Image (cartoon, rainbow, N blue to C red):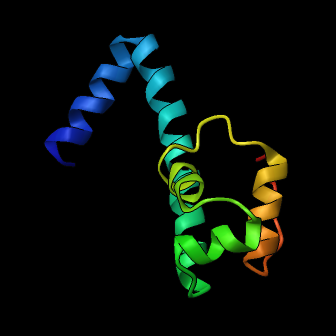
Amino acid sequence: MSDLKKYITERKKRDKGFAGGYDEGYEQFKIGVVLKQAREKSGLTQEELALRLKTKKTAISRIENHAEDIKLSTLEKVAHALGKRLEVKIA
């Protein structure tokens, strides 16, 4: 385990506020990464995806880099523009 992972694990154990914030931030980060990977796999640039969604490239960048509070309807639109379908799973 890396020093960073050790630090995060220990800090989460002793600081519940850090733990909650870290986990929430990580989940938001993952959403942006998944969207970026799907866009790239589809062979589209941010600008091309923006055109399909009738929005601006900056909006796509913001979604990919700061996916906090993204609406489910927005995720559905992005998936559709990429020729995909959105699946939500509660595990």
Q: Residue at x 49, y 34 (%)?
A: 25
Q: Is residue 33 left or right of residue 87?
A: left
Q: Is residue 91 left or right of residue 58?
A: right
Relative vertical location of residue 59 with respect to residue 17 in this rendering, above or below: below
Relative vertical location of residue 86 with respect to residue 27 in this rendering, above or below: below
Q: Nearer the viewer, residue 7 or 29?
A: 29
Relative vertical location of residue 68 with respect to residue 31 in this rendering, above or below: above
Which quarter of the picture shows residue 42?
Answer: bottom right
Could you say where residue 28 lies in the image, as x and y percent from the top left?
55, 42
Relative vertical location of residue 77 with respect to residue 29 in this rendering, above or below: below
Q: Is residue 11 left or right of residue 59?
A: left
Q: Residue at x 54, y 70 (%)?
A: 46
Q: Nearer the viewer, residue 89 or 84?
A: 84
Could you say where residue 71 lies in the image, as x and y percent from the top left?
77, 42
Q: Residue at x 56, y 84 (%)?
A: 41
Q: Nearer the viewer, residue 16 or 88?
A: 88
Residue 90 visible in the displayed image: yes
Residue 87 visible in the displayed image: no
Q: How many marks?
A: 0
Which quarter of the picture shows residue 4?
Answer: top left
Could you say where residue 72 lies in the image, as x and y percent from the top left?
81, 47
Q: Residue at x 53, y 67 (%)?
A: 36
Could you say where residue 38 lies in the image, as x and y percent from the top left?
60, 74
